[in-house]
Amino acid sequence: QVQLVESGGGSVQAGGSLRLSCAASGRTISQYAMGWFRQAPGKEREFVAAIRLNGYADSVEGRFTISRDNAKNTVYLQMNSLKPEDTAVYYCAAVQRDYIGKKTYLYDYWGQGTQVTVSS
């Protein structure tokens, strides 16, 4: 079992930056593909970014960068040039596979989420 805890969310003005963290416990994440998703009110959870075991990453926005520090058992999401439409709850996810997963069903473990609010 992997437990995931997100942090780093908050309120920021448009154009600002935030770095989210996802701290894992229970297992080392070095053998897990990791992902970030977000869910705005009334909308489905959607893919934001993902990273494979070797650090290869993909994201839906060039403004967002995912990274991993296996030594710290932590994954990060750096978000720059934030827009009001980025407002959502951001979730971290993990799966003991090696791929870029862009669908929620591809992940087995989820955190509780952290709120990001971007004001104009």
Image: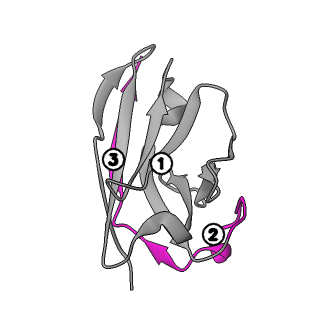
* Residue 93 spot, x, y in % from top left: 50, 65
Q: Is residue 116 left or right of residue 35?
A: left
Label 2's element?
Answer: helix
Q: Which residue is labeled 3 in the image?
A: 115
19, above or below 49, in the image: above
Q: Is residue 52 left or right of residue 2?
A: right
The C terminus sits in image quarter: top left
Instruction: Tell me the amino acid under the disc marked 1.
Output: Arg
Graded by Cα atoms within 10 Å as few (under 14), some (14 to 19) or many (20 or more), the crowding at tag 1 reads many
Q: Which residues are magenta?
A: 98-120
Q: Is residue 28 left or right of residue 65?
A: left
* Residue 14 spot, x, y in % from top left: 43, 16
65, above or below 54, in the image: above
Q: Which residue is labeled 2 in the image?
A: 104
Among the 4 quarters of the image, the one containing residue 19: top left
Among the 4 quarters of the image, the one containing residue 23: bottom left
Label 3's element?
Answer: strand
Q: Which residue is labeled 1 in the image?
A: 68
Q: Residue at x 51, y 17 (%)?
A: 81
The Cα–Cα distance between marks 1 and 2, rounded to whole angstroms, is 19 Å
